[in-house]
Image (cartoon, coloured by chain):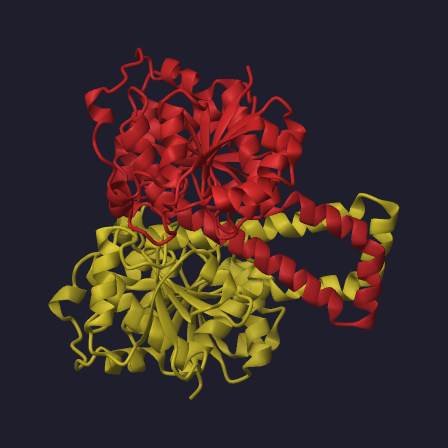
Chain colours: A yellow, B red
């Protein structure tokens, strides 16, 4: 298979430069990739010309229309039908690409992806899933911000999808799945998370359910999959990023604060560089919209070319591992494209930006 | 004033040792402190005997009964009437102590404190508040786990209390107050947080309302007070702790991984020690139950004597700064001990442990 990826050329704070340069990096790692690059030809063509190999592997699809970062999803659905983001998703729907990747407006992208691609059979709402660094191994976490409010059924479906993701993409044989809560005891939390626990426990699915975990369990890596609603998940993700960034800054300040510290920094630099590399947020970039009829990956809006290239790597891996097909099998139902529950419009404006 | 602190001698993983040793440390810093130490005399007396100064400043109140860490708050209310935790809170109610401090079961402590002390006028539910480290200055955050589900009115009251806390305890002249959300735009989040925003904005109170902030804003320190529900707040707190701990471990591993790294560690050790001290979770130990007729401080259950001593320092500071009196003034109502809304029993089992 030669994976074909549709790119929203105009999404992201530093687009289109990071999109084209990131695609060139991804092509260096996966020489069989092909791209459908959507956006302003006048801006994209000169960038492409700097990468002859990429240019040869890329079909350019021109449009003037762009979804701004602060546009409400409901407005983007109406006004963005010709946008670079929408063209990329449409290309997946039309079978002209296998995956769509964008660093643009998250809420708009989720809304468009749900309307165009529909959800997988058995899935009411897609979730944003990604891997977070931990003491042991990457931990799959979802939802990271697609659904501010969730039902127990939503959380149950996220658990099923997250488990498949850990098996298919990370290669964990029997992933442990936990629900994020304010304590590990069964009585803890609100009624939604307690009902979700009962659904997962009593589902009859061969899921290794590990019960409730607290927020510290993510960094500790004591389970493979952590499930929560999009409100809590988004805040947990941003708190992780904020704390890591605070620590990195404080480490630098601490070393810079004295002559001996600066000397220690020089001597210990390889160790510090390795540490930075381990927690480089760019390498964890690329969150999948899990639960759609199609692979859609969201890059962080503020990332650079390295980060965008990493997001493309996520898309490639999801395609190679057949993640969506395995979710469909796991939900135990035949594919029902356009099933009633997949036609409902997303409660888009609650998604994160 | 000579602050009198009632101690739950038996609460906490390493009680009663940390309680007595922590009290001795606090007495070293605040020589005018007096204590009412509640718990098993046979265990406490030998510990006290090692600190003659503390022994002289302490009244011992014997009880055999202890609230276990995993006891449901509703059960603790019925069965724990003679427990060391309850005796400490009763001492505040009886005017025999100015504050109660425990490292025991959080949910039980919140339930007992609400039943015995009642909430302040204008406050429906107390919140757990604490200071978190940030790039700039400590950030007041609440609720950290008392209320898994909150109404907009709860969040509004937390905002008022948090603002007073930042002024009274941290000495910030005009604290900025923000609501934690999945994005900064007004349309983001669920209906509870959006209604809470309207309440704060339109309250007429002279609060510097800074709008919504994302999870990364805590570590960035871009506001003085961050308000959220107890579910999200507890997870944000534990994610912060988990990420900081992961980073510290990874830093050590990174330096230990090579000869040059080990040398760099030796040279840079003062800088690394300063870094560790800045983020030492023990120094941030001690969360106040804000909104009660009385000062009640919860220590982390797993802390050591240094951490317990820091929690006692929080209690002393709250007393010295008259935080509760200022909250009462701020709510714009006269003290109404035993007002109807302060008699309602807490939905205790949702609190964290």
Residue B275 placement, left or right of A309: right
The answer to whether any part of residue B233 appears in the image is yes
Front residue (pair A40, B305): B305
The residue located at (83%, 50%) in the rendering is: A261
What percent of the width, then of the height, locates residue B51?
65, 37
**Nearer the observer, A170 or B55:** B55
Q: Residue furthest left?
A: A340
Q: How many marks?
A: 0
Q: Is residue B215 left or right of residue B124?
A: right
Q: Residue at x 54, y 33 (%)?
A: B312
- Quadrant hosting residue B148: top left
Asked if residue A116 shows in the view, the reply is no
Q: In the image, A240: left or right of A142?
A: right
| Residue B131 image position (x, y, % from top left) | 52, 36
Residue A83 location (% of width, % of height): 36, 57
The quarter of the picture where residue B269 lies is bottom right
Task: Please determine whether, in this image, residue B226 is positioned above or below residue A124.
Answer: above
Q: Quarter holding the N terminus of chain B?
A: top right
Q: Is residue B201 above or below residue B80?
A: above
Q: Residue at x 45, y 45 (%)?
A: B11
Q: Residue furthest bottom?
A: A1
Residue A20 falls left or right of residue B181: right
Vertical relation: A98 (above or below) B80: below
């Amino acid at each position: 298979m030669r994976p074909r990826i549709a790119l929203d050329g105009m999404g992201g704070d530093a687009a289109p430069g990071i999109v084209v340069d990131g695609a060139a990096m991804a092509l260096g790692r996966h020489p069989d990739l092909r791209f459908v690059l959507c956006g302003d030809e006048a801006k994209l063509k000169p960038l492409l010309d700097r990468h002859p190999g990429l240019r040869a592997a890329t079909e350019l699809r021109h449009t003037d229309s762009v979804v701004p970062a602060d546009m409400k999803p409901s407005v983007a659905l109406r006004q963005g039908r010709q946008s670079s983001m929408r063209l990329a998703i449409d290309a997946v729907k039309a079978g002209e690409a296998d995956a769509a990747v964008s660093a643009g407006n998250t809420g708009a992208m989720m809304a468009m992806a749900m309307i165009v691609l529909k959800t997988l059979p058995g899935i009411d709402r897609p979730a944003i899933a990604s891997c977070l660094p931990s003491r042991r191994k990457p931990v799959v976490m979802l939802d990271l911000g697609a659904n501010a409010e969730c039902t127990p059924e939503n959380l149950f479906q996220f658990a099923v999808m997250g488990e498949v993701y850990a098996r298919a993409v990370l290669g964990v044989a029997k992933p442990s799945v936990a629900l994020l809560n304010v304590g590990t005891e069964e009585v803890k939390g609100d009624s939604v998370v307690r009902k979700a626990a009962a659904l997962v426990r009593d589902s009859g699915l061969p899921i290794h359910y590990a019960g409730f975990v607290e927020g510290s369990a993510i960094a500790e890596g004591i389970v493979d999959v952590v499930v929560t609603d999009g409100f809590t998940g988004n805040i947990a993700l941003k708190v992780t990023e904020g704390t890591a960034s605070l620590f990195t800054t404080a480490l630098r300040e601490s070393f810079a604060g004295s002559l001996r510290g600066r000397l220690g920094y020089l001597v210990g630099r390889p160790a510090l560089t390795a540490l930075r590399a381990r927690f480089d947020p760019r390498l964890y970039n690329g969150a999948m919209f899990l639960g759609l009829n199609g692979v859609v990956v969201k890059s962080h809006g503020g990332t650079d070319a390295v980060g965008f290239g990493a997001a493309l790597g996520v898309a490639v891996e999801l395609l190679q591992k057949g993640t969506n097909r395995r979710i469909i099998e796991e939900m135990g139902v035949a594919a029902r494209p356009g099933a009633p529950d997949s036609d409902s419009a997303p409660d888009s404006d609650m998604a994160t930006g």
